[in-house]
Image: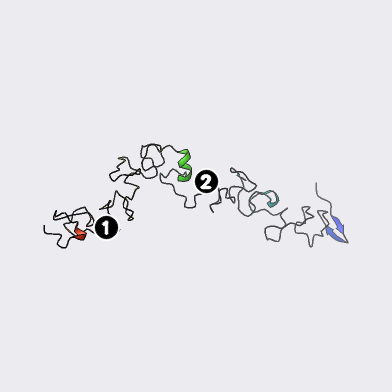
Amino acid sequence: MRQATVYLNCTADTDDDGYANTIDNCPAVSNADQADNYGTSAGDACEDTDTVLDIADNCPTVSNGGQANNYGGPAGDACDDSDSDTVVDESDNCPTTSNVGQEDVDGDGVGDACDATNDVDTDNDSILNEVDNCPTTPNLDQANNYGGSAGDACEDTDNDGPLDDVDNCPTAPNPGQENTYGGSAVGDACDDVDSDGVVDVDDNCPDMY
């Protein structure tokens, strides 16, 4: 049924909301508050960016026709950030736990921050988290040659940067991984090419006993 046109001081007011059509930001929809919260010329009551009128849209500035809101709160997933990590819920691989970097070691689409509590084998190396000495780094062999509770794949015993499983001298700091003498796999900081009891880095004649 066609809405009757009301005249306000001889000027048409189609929606009878007290605002003449010429100044009404929603001339066909009654909106006495003339709300326009999203900075356009059209009022919220008749504006629509994604098939849902802004006045009823849980994400009026982002297109989200489905109005998904899986994590609570008044805003929809498309524009809400439930865990305040700067990644909106719709794109967040762990929307209930803050994880700015969105790390996902095992590539299963679920962020490590959520895997830690929901996944029994975060790094998919067949070793359950509760007994894995490197639960976020695959290491089926569970090698732990240099002491400590963590395995070589995620531990840096000498705190020099390279992890134990790639450090050519895991028990002595050598961030540069120098290996000048003898061409062995062992770095100068812990190698003794001439077997004289003095490691190469301190030996004034590393090639001769």
Q: Nearer the viewer, mark 1 or mark 2?
A: 1
Point out residue 180 in the picture as x, y percentages from the top left corner.
20, 60
Query: Which residue is drawn at the image coordinates 63% and 55% (left, top)?
Result: 61
The vertical placement of 144 against 29, above or below, is above
Helix, strand or loop for disc 2: loop
Disc 1: which residue: 177
Point out residue 179 in the picture as x, y percentages from the top left corner.
22, 58
Amino acid type indicated by mark 1: Gln
Q: Nearer the viewer, residue 100 or 201?
A: 201
Q: How is the image coloured?
A: rainbow
The vertical placement of 120 against 87, above or below, is above
Helix, strand or loop for disc 1: loop
Crowding around mark 2 (Cα neighbors within 10 Å: few <14, some 14 to 19, many 20+) is some
Query: Which residue is drawn at the image coordinates 19% and 58% (left, top)?
Result: 200
Amino acid type indicated by mark 2: Thr
Taking the image as shown, residue 85 lies to the left or right of residue 185, namely right
Residue 43 occupies which quadrant of the picture? Answer: bottom right
Point out residue 97 in the picture as x, y percentages from the top left corner.
52, 46
Report the residue that reaches farthest toward the front: 197
Q: Which mark is residue 97?
A: 2
The vertical placement of 84 against 118, above or below, is below
Crowding around mark 1 (Cα neighbors within 10 Å: few <14, some 14 to 19, many 20+) is some
Q: Answer yes or no: do the residues labelled 1 and 2 have beta carbons within 8 Å?
A: no
Instruction: Please state, as top left, top right, bottom left or bottom right, where the C terminus lies in the image.
Output: bottom left
Taking the image as shown, residue 206 lies to the left or right of residue 162, namely left
**N-term mark: 1 or 2:** 2
Query: Which residue is drawn at the image coordinates 27% and 54% (left, top)?
Result: 172
Residue 161 occupies which quadrant of the picture? Answer: bottom left
